[in-house]
């Protein structure tokens, strides 16, 4: 089989790059290991900073994927790829060989596995959930505690699996501060009587509109921010979660009981990113894929005909992912 361009990954970056190339007259095949594209986006309720409906955006991307020049191959993983005679030859999990001129890697990230932080009790106590679990509850419009009741107190913990040398991730995942503020506001909209706390190391509200959500979360919704780290969480006999923390502003240790503890998990390279970046010799820090030059050629790699876009390179927010995908498509077109 001969293809002009193959894109690996059908998240927002892969689909956006495919669509840009298709409208420019290129035939593109998009491989995705899941049957259905856009897994991470489908599990979100609203997007920061403007509370856009994630399902509307999902539909927009689905429509883009239906462009007549795009062939979608869901439920198919790329298990190997190598450069042969000036072309890329990809192997699928069904044993097919795919021959193509160019490849864009859009294999993205995976959320940090919170059970690796055993002391926080994820997977042990039902009242400890991750930001992904919370997003699913918000999507259903019903936030409940471990026994199915409405929570009267919810605590969020930042930087789980990021900025943490113990798990080997010294980097900041960039999006979890604003996600916590957004989710906290959504919880208060659903449960105005609930008390909501956010435990943080630093607040990184770097993007346009982020600071405004942060301010509004305090002024309009009464969300309380505590500068401190939770060192331990344990279940109580009545289904709550007892947390031990240190308020790093006052230096005082504290204990608190909460109905839900939400762990804001960071981003790690997906298995596909790690594996394919390794196979192609472009493995960067922490297992993310490495571009040729972060300032000037951030979509280009040291391998001819191999391009990168989105969070396979590093943690990125959705706006940046979409811009980056367009930029990857442009780089590829320039080379033709
Ligand atoms: S964005 Fe915020 S919560 Fe996420 S790793 Fe960075 S500082 Fe921590």
Image (tube, rainbow, N blue to C red):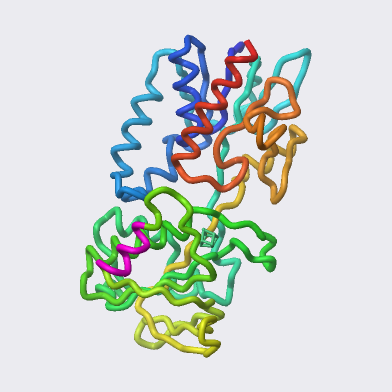
> Would residue 275 appear left or right of 314 to someone viewing this image?
right
Is residue 140 visible in the rendered structure shown here? yes
Image: 34 above or below 253: above
> Would residue 218 appear left or right of 173 to someone viewing this image?
left
- Where does residue 152 sit, x and y in percent of width and height? 27, 78
Residue positioned 36% across, 29% down in the render: 62
Q: Residue 23 magenta-drawn?
A: no
Image: 32 above or below 173: above
Is residue 245 visible in the rendered structure shown here? no
> Would residue 251 appear left or right of 289 to someone viewing this image?
left
* Image quadrant in which you'd find residue 78: top right
Residue positioned 58% across, 73% down in the render: 118
Image quarter (top left, top right, bottom left or bottom right) of the N terminus: top right
Q: Residue 219 magenta-drawn?
A: yes
- Where does residue 217 sit, x and y in percent of width and height? 32, 65
Image: 229 above or below 46: below
| Residue in the foreground of this view, choosing between 127 and 178 | 178
Number of numbered discs: 0
Residue positioned 56% across, 80% down in the render: 231
> Would residue 191 appear left or right of 105 to someone viewing this image?
left
- Where does residue 117 sit, x and y in percent of width and height? 59, 70
Magenta residues, dominant SS class: helix
Image quarter (top left, top right, bottom left or bottom right) of the C terminus: top right
| Residue in the foreground of this view, choosing between 248 and 147 | 248
- Where does residue 3 sit, x and y in percent of width and height? 59, 13
Image: 161 above or below 7: below
| Residue in the foreground of this view, choosing between 47 and 94 | 47
Q: Which segment is the magenta one?
A: 212-220
| Residue in the foreground of this view, choosing between 213 and 311 | 213
């Amino acid at each position: 089989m001969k293809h002009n361009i193959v894109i690996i990954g059908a998240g927002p970056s892969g689909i956006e790059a495919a669509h840009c190339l298709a409208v420019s007259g290129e035939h593109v095949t998009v491989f995705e290991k899941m049957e259905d594209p856009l897994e991470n986006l489908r599990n979100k309720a609203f997007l920061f900073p403007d509370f856009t409906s994630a399902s509307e955006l999902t539909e927009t991307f689905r429509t883009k994927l239906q462009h007549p020049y795009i062939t979608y191959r869901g439920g198919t993983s790329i298990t190997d790829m190598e450069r042969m005679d000036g072309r890329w030859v990809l192997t699928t999990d069904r044993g097919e060989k795919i021959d193509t001129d160019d490849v864009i890697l859009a294999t993205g990230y995976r959320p940090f596995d919170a059970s690796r932080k055993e002391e926080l009790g994820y997977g042990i106590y039902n009242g400890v959930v991750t930001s992904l679990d919370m997003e699913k509850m918000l999507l259903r419009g019903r936030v409940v505690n471990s026994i199915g009741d409405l929570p009267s107190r919810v605590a969020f913990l930042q930087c789980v699996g990021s900025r943490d040398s113990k798990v080997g991730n010294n980097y900041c995942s960039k999006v979890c501060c604003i996600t916590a503020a957004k989710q906290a506001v959504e919880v208060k909209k659903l449960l105005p009587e609930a008390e909501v706390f956010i435990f943080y190391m630093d607040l990184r509200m770097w993007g346009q509109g982020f600071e405004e959500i942060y301010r509004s979360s305090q002024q309009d919704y009464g969300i309380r921010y505590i500068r401190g780290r939770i060192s331990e969480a344990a279940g109580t006999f009545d289904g709550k979660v007892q947390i031990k923390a240190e308020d790093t502003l006052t230096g005082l240790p504290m204990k608190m009981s909460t109905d839900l503890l939400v762990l804001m998990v960071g981003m790690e390279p997906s298995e596909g990113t790690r594996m394919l970046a390794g196979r192609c010799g472009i493995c960067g820090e922490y297992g993310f894929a490495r571009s040729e030059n972060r300032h000037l050629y951030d979509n280009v790699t040291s391998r001819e005909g191999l391009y990168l876009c989105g969070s396979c390179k590093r943690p990125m927010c959705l706006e940046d992912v979409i811009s980056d995908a367009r930029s990857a498509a442009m780089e590829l077109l320039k080379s033709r």
